[in-house]
Amino acid sequence: MMHVELLDGRRISVPLAWFPKLARATREQRSHWRWIGGGIGIHWEELDEDISIEGLLKP
């Protein structure tokens, strides 16, 4: 599972299976991330993966 805590206090948890690159990555690779776009998304340089917070909030 990937857990994200938002500034407004909400916590989002989504299965890593939704993101195959992250699911196949090692824990170490997943730990190297950074916020992008002023906090609108998360980027993993080594994995070439970007996930928007808006995308996590959509059902």
Image (spheres, rainbow, N blue to C red):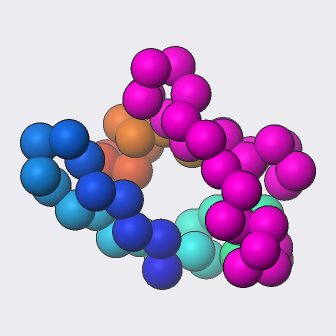
Most distant residue in the right direction: 46
Q: Is residue 29 toward the left or the right of residue 54 in the image?
A: right
User: Is 19 located above or below residue 15 in the figure?
Assistant: above
Instruction: Note whether residue 20 is visible.
Output: no
Dividing the image into 4 quarters, which one contains the C terminus?
bottom left
Q: Where are the magenta residues, as a range? A: 24-50
What residue is shown at x 70% (from left), y 66% (from top)?
A: 30
Q: Is residue 14 left or right of residue 7?
A: right
Q: What is the quadrant of residue 42 in the picture? A: top right
The image quarter containing residue 39 is: top left
> What is the x, y in percent for residue 53?
40, 40
Please state the horizontal and vertical placement of residue 29, each as a whole percent of the image.
79, 67
Q: Is 51 within the magenta?
A: no
Asked if 12 appears above or below 49 in the picture, the reply is below
Which residue sits furthest top? 37
Above/below status of 4 relative to 58: below
Number of numbered labels in the structure image: 0
The residue under the point 61% across, 41% down is 34
* Residue 1 in the image, given as x and y percentages of width and height: 48, 80
**Residue 39 on the magenta segment:** yes
The percent position of residue 36, horizontal first and vertical second, equals 56, 28
Q: Is residue 18 visible?
A: yes
- Name the residue: 47% across, 71% down: 2
Please give left or right for residue 34 compared with residue 40 in the image: right
